[in-house]
Amino acid sequence: MSRSLRSTSAAVLAGLLLTWLPAPTALAAPAPGRPPVVHTQSGAVSGVQADGVDGYLGIPYAAPPVGELRWSPPQPPARWDGVRAADAYGNRCPATESTNGPRSETEDCLFVNVQRPAGTTPEDRLPVYVFIHGGGLVNGSSNQADMAAMVAATGIVGVTMNYRLGVLGFLGHPQLTARQGESGNYGLMDQQAALRWVQENIAAFGGDPARVTIGGESAGGWSVCSHLVAPGSRDLFAGAMIQSGSCPSRSQDAADAEGEVVAQAVGCAQLASAVACLRGTPVGELIDAPIPIVPPVAGTPFLPVAPREAVRRGDLADVPVVVGATRDEGRTFMAGSIGWTGEQYETWVRDAFAGDADAVLARYPWPADANEFTGAYLSGAIVTDAGIAFGIGGCANRALTRDLAAHVPTWAYEFAARTGPGVQPIPGYEWGAGHAAELAYLFPSFDNGVPIAPTFDAGEQQLAAEMKQYWGAFVRQGDPGVPGQADWPSYDAEQVVLSLQPAGRSAAVPDAAVAEEHQCAFWDPLTADGA
């Protein structure tokens, strides 16, 4: 991808993640009720029970990453005596305010949550779904993906976790690299530590450590791809699901250079003392420092090979994979371009595509009957089809799907519920199936400041129920097939994609139709895989 396209990727995601309206501050917990105490390797925990689900929330899986542990690999949590209450979600990891949550400056945030069908015992050995939240690796929290509805509907055990974000989770710096042999993947290391915690503790909750599926959306999907190829993660799961994700990465040199810019911004420019200075800087100053959207760091002990290249050549965990995207990813990313004029749209295209701009403008022309939403619809279509938001959606997602299917059993989907409520009310704007639109169908707790799932009509409610069953089936059996629902053949066997539609209209469609829908014959030569 060209430098201009990489800049566009960062700008597109930044517009989504950092500028929307604030979200409510409450962290909802289930209504009180007490399931049995569970003994983890660090101590006993008591949970809560509601609506047929036992919840054990806010369990430490690593020590608070403070002091010398700030920008260090996660360490084991301290043991505790007695019974620890695990009845509310733990602290959010530090991040500025966004629709993914309120501002947080609490570094003691490395918690895991376990939800299981009420009455589950250690002898049940139920399959486990570990979901990694999105947010561009700069914001978000596990409570946005409360697993209670999926657990109740499918009988699996659900696990979510918080992990270090932004500058605290993904800062590279030459002094950290010199001391540790790498830097910039601390958030991924947290996720890996949580997966190890699952292996060591989930049996006590009635889960089967041999049947763990990991999944994630957006940056959570980036994370899943990283774990598919990371040597230290491959033995920690038996299946993977990538929702609106991709496999981006940056080099250690790039991460170190970006980290020096951050260090200078907070008054820690002296190289020799930078680490001590940064560790002494108040967390509020750090999260307010300008830091770009930064993908994982490759060419390191944690990620020896760039994830996209590793997938391309088949150097990944030998597990079944579900991979997919939404039909109109870019309509979420580009909602900020509502009101653009034709001139503004053309400027954006020329900035993003340089020498290819004339061809792009001819393919996506400004119409004579334009209105205030035209700029968002056109730029959103380009972002979707080209996959220029770090390889999310469209032709880039199709290329990733094809590469996965060349090496592991793969099922592909496209979330195509284009008339749903979207992620935020904007009068007159048609969200289509924008980025993150599918999340509320799986996790009713997900919203962007305004409830989404309660607004579903009957057809959308049916799709939400069907999607939970597909996801649960894959976790249980490594194949998303569900009797009585639309057949979902594997991509590697039949070259088809399941189009997820409301009101029972989901159906498998040929890969060629997806390629035509996103104009891949045009985009593939221009953008390669978009990552």
Image: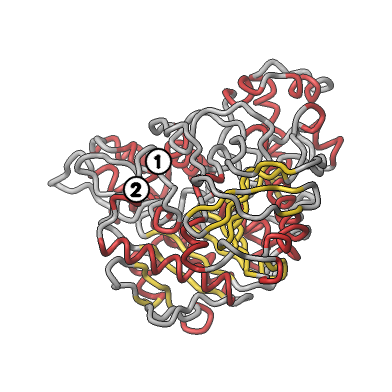
| Other residues around mark 1 within 10 Å, as few (<14) / some (14–19) / many (≥20) | many
Residue closest to the eye, 71 or 193: 193
The image position of residue 220, as x and y in percent, is 57, 51
Residue at 85% from the left image edge and 36% from the top image edge: 178
Residue 319 to residue 226: above or below: below
Residue 121 to residue 19: above or below: below
Q: Residue furthest left?
A: 369
Q: Which residue is mark 2?
A: 452
In the rendered structure, which amino acid carries the disc numbered 1?
Asn
Of the numbered discs in the image, which one, if any, rests on residue 472? none
Does residue 367 appear left or right of residue 324 in this picture?
A: left
Residue at 84% from the left image edge and 22% from the top image edge: 272
Q: Is residue 284 visible?
A: yes
Residue 68 to residue 148: above or below: above
Residue at 41% from the left image edge and 51% from the top image edge: 435
Q: Are marks 1 and 2 in contact (CB under 8 Å)?
A: yes
Q: Which residue is mark 1?
A: 448
Query: Which quadrant of the view contains residue 349?
Result: top left
The image position of residue 4, as x and y in percent, is 49, 42
Q: Could you tell me how far apart the alpha carbons at marks 1 and 2 are, in whole angstroms?
A: 8 Å
Q: Residue furthest right?
A: 179
- Mark 1, secondary structure of its residue: loop
Query: Which quadrant of the view contains residue 233?
Result: bottom right
In the rendered structure, which amino acid carries the disc numbered 2?
Ile
Query: Which quadrant of the view contains residue 263?
Result: top right
